[in-house]
Amino acid sequence: MFFAAAAPPVSLTYTPLTAGNPIWSDGPYEVQSYVPGQKIVLVPNPYWGATTGNNTTATSWSLDPNRHRYVAKISIDETLGSDAAADEVQQEIQAGTLDLEWNTTVPANSLAGLANYSNALFGSFPSPGITNPYLVFNLQAATPLQNVKVRQALEYAINKVALAKIYGGTNFNVPLNQVFGPGAEGYIAGYNPYPTTNNEGDASKCKSLLKAAGYANGFTITDAYRTDGNHPAIFEEVQKDFGACGVTVNGKGISQGYYTSSGILQTTASALASSGWDITEPGWVPDWYGAASARSILPDLFGSSDFPGTNWGDFSNANVDSLVTSAETATTLSAATSDWQAANKAVMEQAPFIPFMGQLTNLMHASSVHNAIYCPFSAQYNLADIWLS
């Protein structure tokens, strides 16, 4: 990813993300040409693995056992990179006219026929700690959502199985009931502070708790949702589930390209208060995985210092912040894990969000593709390892 690549000092003189600027590469491939929204062409980086600037051979470099660079050129068609194109991409891969997906996954309507994993060209991969999508409350807007008892009541509203079906069902989307998913640091096996039968929601429980909180007749809120892919269906299910509890949800559609930049992202608490949205459904994928992954999840979503930022609803809690600091300065993994688990519970007690599911990444490749190794950071196969027949 270009934003993570090492770059020379001269890169600081360029305006970020301006068309025509150099795209720096410190990996096995570099960008030969780029037409935004249309096509990206990657070719061997001549300075990768060489000091003379002439290493363009599209073969394995013996000094790097993980990035082999077998392929001489990679052509990426960005016009097929949207959710709307997923069906076309799937058909072309199966026909052998495309090799791999780019920014798409196997469409949900194709997953039922692949669920037995008998097709060797299909892979379903975990990304421990992913929570995508999830519902976040705007805690600055002047609505009943500022009341923690209201938020706790709404935790019971959502039919997480119905949401999982939008993405292909529970075989590929595990209902999530806490901050961390299975496999992530801080996950607590069996922890479910707002249980419902089969994770299908409990409108009666929700309505009872709303009545106890002083909202027997419900209230009205606005959901800022993305208008592409599966997101309108997610909005409709949230609208239905909250409606069953007596809460009216109006929709405010935002196109994907503006969802965060000029949609839900606000730079001050007062701006967030008047932003026009009360709930929204973003997603989160950790920046890294493994035994110390919690710090790339919980602080980004719920740390006071991450507003403005990916703490979209401006949740702030001194106990949570203290536990985060303790976890990040712990001297042993066991001590850090204990603190992260305590922070997990502390967040869920305050209910600043409703977790929906942890998704598997479902990918398909053509029969011509070999050595397809999944990379969770990019949620794609590692292009530097693939070879073709």
Image: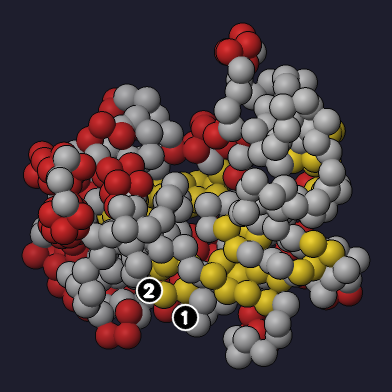
Which residue, given by chain and number where applicable, does mark 2 sit on? 175
Q: Is residue 158 visible?
A: yes
**Helix, strand or loop at mark 2:** strand
Residue that appears at 38% across and 34% down: 309
Identify the image quadrant of residue 85.
bottom right
Which residue, given by chain and number where applicable, does mark 1 sit on? 170
Check if mark 1's residue and mark 2's residue have beta carbons within 8 Å. yes
Where does residue 13 sit, x and y in percent of width and height? Answer: 61, 9
Q: Is residue 220 visible?
A: no
Of mark 1 and mark 2, the one earlier in the sequence is 1
Left or right: 300 as drawn, with respect to 148: right
Check the picture and name the quadrant holding the C terminus.
Answer: bottom right
**Helix, strand or loop at mark 1:** loop
Residue placed most toward the observer, 387 or 185: 387
Identify the image quadrant of residue 33.
top right
Work out whether 181 lies above or below 367.
Answer: above
Check the picture and name the quadrant holding the N terminus.
Answer: top right
